[in-house]
Image: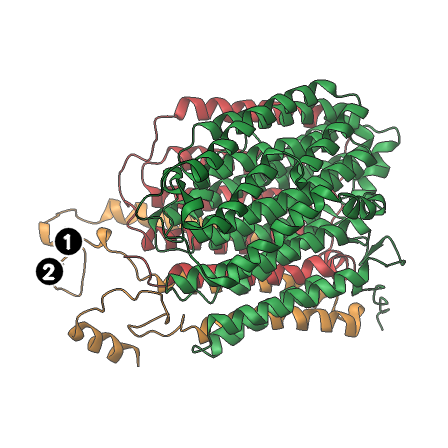
């Protein structure tokens, strides 16, 4: 095993463990914190794949912002923070569906790429920049329109108009 | 490539070991004599009045959190832009200026809508403002904000 | 000294309608925040001017003879995009009037309605022209996000419930779509719709991967167009959301999502059409049957129209599965006709049940109270049922012909049976409107502006039913994709 594979296995085990704890945790705040670990490990996997920029995005946006928003919304609502049952009695079915999807995707990707080996050669963040700012001009500017719409939504929702 | 991140991994390891070790060592060394007073949440020495778990944060924090996300995403795009700033030249500058301008529109909108006003009225122009809080409460909050 | 990269060739003219819409939306948003006293009427007029401006540019783009795609292959300039944009802008203008009327009459101040409507329209018109899956996804998100908020624009709790359901299931479907984009990239190494078609027409390795990508994209689109079994959200959202918003989104979302679906499947995945047509056929058949059968059991007019809109998704898919130019043309004609009749039908609902009491029994005897509204409602329902001489009839005939010509007779047989079932519940409402005594509470709204607005799709429904050649003429060139 190369050093990359060792790192990948470690990240995978930690991330998977955190993900399992995330869905089985009885305290919703603990679940959010397990989500941090799980997302950070995915970010680490991106690093192993030599996708530095994507890894930074993962850490800054997901670990940094999304989880913070998640914790905020736990505090905004009167969500039960504590040892509460978060289950809806459908553990069995959802586990089955999840495993089915995992098996299907694993088979599919194994079938599509077989033993093709891709040497991860580092994509410098600058190359990503050139691609975004040369080829994806319109999508890039549209992101801001999307953000605007989201923000109007937030203002509308935060207005005191519900009893 | 990956070895560039070795210092970060080492630092993370040191932090983890330090945190776990200091907790473990202190729990081994300290005497453990709990009393009800010691187990209470610490609120500057006052006896806590309410259970904080049932409290709800004002919804204004939500707008702040959304603004945070919006600017976070803007920042992410600044990294690749900054690295290729010279190659992209004027065109890249204009592109980024437009993008930041549009995100700034979002900020201006929230600002004008009163989303960042930390007084009682908060976001104005709600179709049906709910009953105002009692006056005593209002004076205290306004005084705190200004 | 670092070598400068020359700026890419950028031709923004083909996206000028979207720039006008998004820029106008932002201007209205800022103006409304800066001037708290501005009335809804002023905002409505401003919005209509912006939509008209975008429509003017759209018409000018019909004669575009430049590159087939611009902005580094992101945006298609074909006439299909232009035609769909025109339909969407018309629906947006009607929706703006509806929204102004509903909130004004209820005494609610909802100035955010207009910028959100314009942003949603930006996303919709853009998705019709997007020739890269990244742009398709972004446009899909812009329109969905705006609609999630619009669906909750009411003080009633059911509106919040509608918004929440729509958001959760919509986010779920976006994830499917995104996974489809990722797998399509994995299979072909590009996200460009034309590029995928090129990669798939050669001998290719990742064929199963591309098939699964197509399936996941189909799931994402099926949520948006409300095809069975991804239709669960539709009745609840249509019933809970404000009628004005439902009128806009039922017509515009379906047109936009179908436009993108038609482009993705008839360009990018056309090389795989032997594989996907049977699946789309099953989807179409199930959608028509389930939508029509469940509509019979409804006692609420908005829920009934929701199931009817589900059934119509099935009929449009029948045209899509032909996977040739005739199929594209017939599905596009169906989209135009469907948008007209559903936006009109919800307009009548808005006028009859302005207070959101929409049970079917409250429509009894509408002909006595308001003969005009009763006539309009009957016209739209007859068109939805597909009875001549309405646009709905011509639309059904053309998709059936396209499907039979392509050799999918079994789907057409199912479709005809579903149409017969569907005719039953439309006619039941018409009987209710004309043959029953009115209830006391039935007080239809007699405001002139929305009534005039509803008359526009009514006239168009009749004109297209009698002279379908008006649009078929346009469709000859509008059903050819250039990439």
For residue B47, the mark is 2
SS for tag 2? Answer: loop
Viewer-closest of A15 and C396: C396
Question: Where residue C210 appears, x then y in whole percent?
Answer: 74, 31
Are labels 2 and 1 on one chain?
Answer: yes
Question: Where residue C249 appears, x then y in whole percent?
Answer: 55, 49
What is the chain letter for disc 1? B
Question: Where residue A30 appears, x then y in whole percent?
Answer: 36, 43
**Residue C268 is at least partly visible in this image:** no
Which residue: 72% across, 73% down? B94
Labels 2 and 1 touching (C-beta < 8 A)? yes
Which hue belongs to chain C?
green
A117 on left or right of C114? right
Q: Which chain is red?
A: A
SS for tag 1? Answer: loop
Which residue: 14% across, 59% down? B48
**Disc 1 designates what residue?**
B40
Sequence-earlier tag: 2 or 1: 1
Badge 1: residue crowd in 10 Å (few <14, some 14–19, many ≥20): few
In the rendered image, the vertical position of residue C268 relative to residue A60, given as above or below: above
Which hue belongs to chain B?
orange
């Amino acid at each position: 095993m190369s050093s990359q594979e060792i790192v990948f296995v470690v990240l995978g085990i930690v991330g998977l463990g955190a993900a399992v704890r995330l869905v089985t945790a009885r305290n919703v705040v603990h679940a959010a914190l397990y989500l941090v670990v799980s997302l950070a490990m995915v970010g680490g996997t991106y690093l192993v794949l030599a996708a530095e920029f994507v890894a930074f995005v993962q850490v800054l946006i997901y670990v940094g912002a999304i989880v913070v928003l998640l914790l905020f919304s736990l505090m905004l609502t009167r969500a039960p923070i504590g040892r509460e049952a978060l289950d809806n009695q459908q553990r069995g079915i959802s586990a089955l569906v999840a495993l089915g999807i995992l098996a299907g995707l694993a088979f599919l990707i194994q079938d599509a790429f077989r033993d093709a080996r891709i040497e991860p050669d580092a994509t410098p963040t600058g190359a990503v920049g050139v691609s975004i700012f040369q080829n994806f001009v319109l999508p890039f500017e549209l992101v801001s329109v999307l953000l605007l719409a989201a923000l109007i939504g937030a203002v509308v929702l935060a207005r005191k108009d519900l009893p | 490539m990956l070895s560039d991140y070795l210092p970060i991994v080492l630092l993370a390891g040191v932090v983890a070991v330090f945190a776990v070790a200091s907790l473990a060592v202190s729990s081994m060394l300290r005497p453990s004599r709990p009393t009800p007073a010691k187990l209470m949440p610490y609120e500057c020495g006052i006896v806590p009045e309410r259970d904080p778990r049932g409290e709800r944060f004002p919804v204004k924090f939500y707008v702040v959190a959304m603004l945070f996300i919006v600017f976070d995403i803007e920042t992410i795009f600044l990294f690749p832009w900054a690295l290729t700033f010279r190659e992209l030249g004027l065109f890249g500058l204009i592109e980024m200026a437009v993008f930041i301008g549009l995100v700034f529109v979002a900020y201006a909108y929230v600002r004008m809508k009163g989303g960042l006003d930390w007084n009682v009225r908060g976001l104005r122009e709600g179709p049906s403002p709910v009953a105002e809080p009692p006056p005593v409460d209002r004076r205290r909050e306004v005084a705190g904000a200004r | 000294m670092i070598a400068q990269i020359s700026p890419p060739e950028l031709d923004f003219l083909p996206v000028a309608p979207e720039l006008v819409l998004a820029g106008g939306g932002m201007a209205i948003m800022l103006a409304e925040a800066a001037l708290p006293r501005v009335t809804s009427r002023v905002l409505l007029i401003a919005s209509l001017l912006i939509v008209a401006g975008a429509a003017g540019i759209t018409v000018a783009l019909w004669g575009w003879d430049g590159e087939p795609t611009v902005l580094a292959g992101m945006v298609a300039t074909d006439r299909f995009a232009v035609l769909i944009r025109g339909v969407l802008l018309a629906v947006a203008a009607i929706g703006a009037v509806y929204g102004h009327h509903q909130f004004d009459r209820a005494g609610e101040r909802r100035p955010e309605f207009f910028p959100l409507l314009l942003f949603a329209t930006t996303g919709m018109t853009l998705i019709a022209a997007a020739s890269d899956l990244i742009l398709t996804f972004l446009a899909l998100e812009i329109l969905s996000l705006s609609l999630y908020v619009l669906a909750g624009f009411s003080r009633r709790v059911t509106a919040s419930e509608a918004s929440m359901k729509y958001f959760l299931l919509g986010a779920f479907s976006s994830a499917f779509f995104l996974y489809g984009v990722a797998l399509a990239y994995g299979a072909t190494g590009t996200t460009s719709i034309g590029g995928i078609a090129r990669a798939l027409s050669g001998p290719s390795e990742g064929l199963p991967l591309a098939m699964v990508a197509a399936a996941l994209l189909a799931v994402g689109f099926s949520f948006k167009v409300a095809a069975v079994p991804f239709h669960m959200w539709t009745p609840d959202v249509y019933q809970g959301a404000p009628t004005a918003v439902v009128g806009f989104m039922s017509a515009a979302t379906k047109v936009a999502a179908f436009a993108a679906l038609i482009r993705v499947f008839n360009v990018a995945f056309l090389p795989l059409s032997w594989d996907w047509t049977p699946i789309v056929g099953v989807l179409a058949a199930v959608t028509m049957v389930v939508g029509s059968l469940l509509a019979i059991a409804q006692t609420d007019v908005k829920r009934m129209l929701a199931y009817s809109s589900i059934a119509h998704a099935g009929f449009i898919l029948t045209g899509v599965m032909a996977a040739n130019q005739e199929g594209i043309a017939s599905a596009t004609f169906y989209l135009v006709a469907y948008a007209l009749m559903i936006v009109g039908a919800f307009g009548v609902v808005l006028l009859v049940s302005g207070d959101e009491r929409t049970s079917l029994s409250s429509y009894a005897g509408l002909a006595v109270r308001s003969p005009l509204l009763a006539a309009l409602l009957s016209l739209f329902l007859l068109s939805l049922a597909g009875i001549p001489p309405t646009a709905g009839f011509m639309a059904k005939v053309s998709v059936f012909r396209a499907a039979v010509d392509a050799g999918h007779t079994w789907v057409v047989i199912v479709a005809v049976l579903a149409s017969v079932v569907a005719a039953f519940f439309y006619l039941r409402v018409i009987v209710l409107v004309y043959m029953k005594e009115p209830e006391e509470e039935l007080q239809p709204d007699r405001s002139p502006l929305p009534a005039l607005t509803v008359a526009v799709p009514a006239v168009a429904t009749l004109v297209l039913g009698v002279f379908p050649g008006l649009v078929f003429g346009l469709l000859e060139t509008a059903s050819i994709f250039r990439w």
